[in-house]
Image (tube, helix red, strand yellow):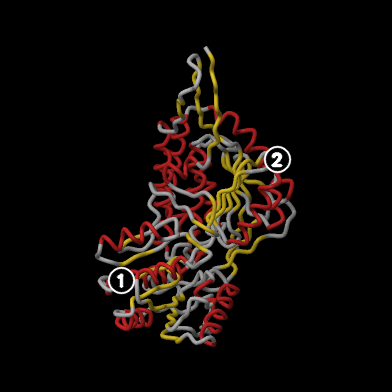
Amino acid sequence: MRRERNFIDGVFVDAGGETAIVVRNPATGEDIAEIDAASEAQVKAAVVAASRSQRDWGRLPAIVRAQYLRRLADVLVDNAGAIGTALASESGKSLADASNETIYAAEITRYHAEWARRIEGEVIPSDSADETILLQREPIGVVACLIPFNYPVYTLMRKIAPALITGNTVVVRPSNNTPLCAFEIARAVEQAGLPSGVVNILAMQHRQAGLLCTQPAVGMITLTGSVNVGRAVLDYCKVNIAKPSLELGGKTPAIIEPDADLEQAASAIVASKTTHCGQLCTAIERVYVHSSVHDRFLTLLRSKFSSVRIGDRAEDTARMGPLVGDRARQEIHAKVQRAISEGAVLEAGGTMPEDKGFFYPATLLSNCRQEMEIVQEEIFGPVLPVLRYDTLDEALQLANDHQFGLSSVLYTEQYRTALKVANRIEAGELYVNRTPADPYQGFHAGWKRSGLGGDDGKHGMLEFTQTRLVVMRY
């Protein structure tokens, strides 16, 4: 069985005496690796190393930091096979998907390297004739990065690349479900020659994660995860008044207008709902269909959902892979059963597979109502509730009647409809005639309980800075 060690201050260190973290292949249910869980002493050592190295790293010209990032991106591409192999084994993704995720991670690293000459401050007019006011952008210091299981390679680089280009250092806690790829990235960091202590990667239990987030030197905590974990992070932030950056739950609504290309919309929605078994924060989670096209659209969805086959993507990439674990599968199935008991109609799927692995079929539910749990709570799996509406105002009211506001989708050919929704949807993103994709240069930020702050683009990069006002009299 594969074993891994934590990466602290530029070296891989032996076990800290904690219970090992067991990694399973979700497609087979088999144990494939053990990770030495970091001890409290190792967590503190990682933060000390990050804090010590930040002084020199933050003083480097940003263009020099960019050279390190470009070198790291090149190494990620060179090692995409090894990183992808590790990710595929622990996530249930195909090798091609896992390797491509590494390529995307390298690209967002290169994107943030380009900000080196564009991290700008401001010159602000003063009320005094003999005075100049400067606003400078500075690094925060040590950033704790908490990484999810669903896209652990891409999200890791999505967080550490902007942190590093702005002069911060990082301590990374990967998901205990998918830590193997993180240690392959640690090897890439080592190979790229980044200074010791700039990037530290440790697998740890929840107690140690809390310790990490409350170390005095940690000035920012960035998380992609659930609302409950986000609340815990906010509690951690209170200890040091650390800055939070939280991408939390999502419940992406898709509005299907009468003039929409129904075939295109149905195909895209099913792909969104079944990619990585629906385990995406921006996957479409509820569909509102105009009454005039509801039955036709439901027929298209039913046909496409029924054609999805589950299985190990290491053997057949045309199949939909597994959920992260059996607990997630049991919880999703319970939600489906409760929806049916409340009056939802099962159009496809909805049965618990008996084969090995943590699979769940693509499941379609019609006759759903807005107040149902299946509509109100994040599913994070291949289950889609469908509701009907009569007017666009009603569709907007239903889409906005929600605790989450991460992403949203509209299918229409009318520009007036698109503009109306763009100005009234209560979400951080709107995608028109396509499903969410999080462009590098955009800003991925949620409203309501979907988070604070955000990732990507100029604004995501600036999340990792703090300001200093300099008032100069002459």
Name of the residue lying farthest toward the top: 474
Around disc 2, counting alpha carbons within 10 Å, would you say few (fewer than 14), some (14 to 19), or many (20 or more)?
some
145 vs 62: above or below:
below
Taking the spot 55% from the left edge, 49% from the top edge, the residue there is: 245
136 vs 187: above or below:
above
Count of numbered badges drawn on the protein: 2
Discs 1, 2 touching: Cβ within 8 Å: no
Taking the spot 41% from the left edge, 63% from the top edge, the residue there is: 408
Please state which amino acid type lies under the numbered disc 2: Pro
Determine whether the residue tagged by mark 1 lies in a helix, strand or loop. loop
x, y percent for residue 85: 47, 59
The answer to whether residue 78 shows anywhere in this view is no
**Residue at label 1?**
257
Taking the spot 38% from the left edge, 52% from the top edge, the residue there is: 439
x, y percent for residue 27: 51, 72
x, y percent for residue 382: 46, 74
Name of the residue lying farthest toward the front: 127
Check the picture and name the quadrant holding the N terminus: bottom right
The answer to whether residue 461 shows anywhere in this view is yes
Q: Which mark is residue 437?
A: none
Mark 1 or 2, closer to the camera: 1
Residue 93 or residue 3, whichever sits in front: 93
How far apart are the alpha carbons under marks 1 and 2?
Answer: 52 Å
**Residue at label 2?**
216
Which corner quadrant of the image does residue 179 belong to? Answer: bottom right
Determine whether the residue tagged by mark 2 lies in a helix, strand or loop. loop
Residue 26 or residue 389, whichever sits in front: 389
103 vs 251: above or below:
above
x, y percent for residue 450: 52, 59
In the picture, measured across the screen, residue 226 lies left or right of residue 387, that is right
Taking the spot 35% from the left edge, 75% from the top edge, the residue there is: 289
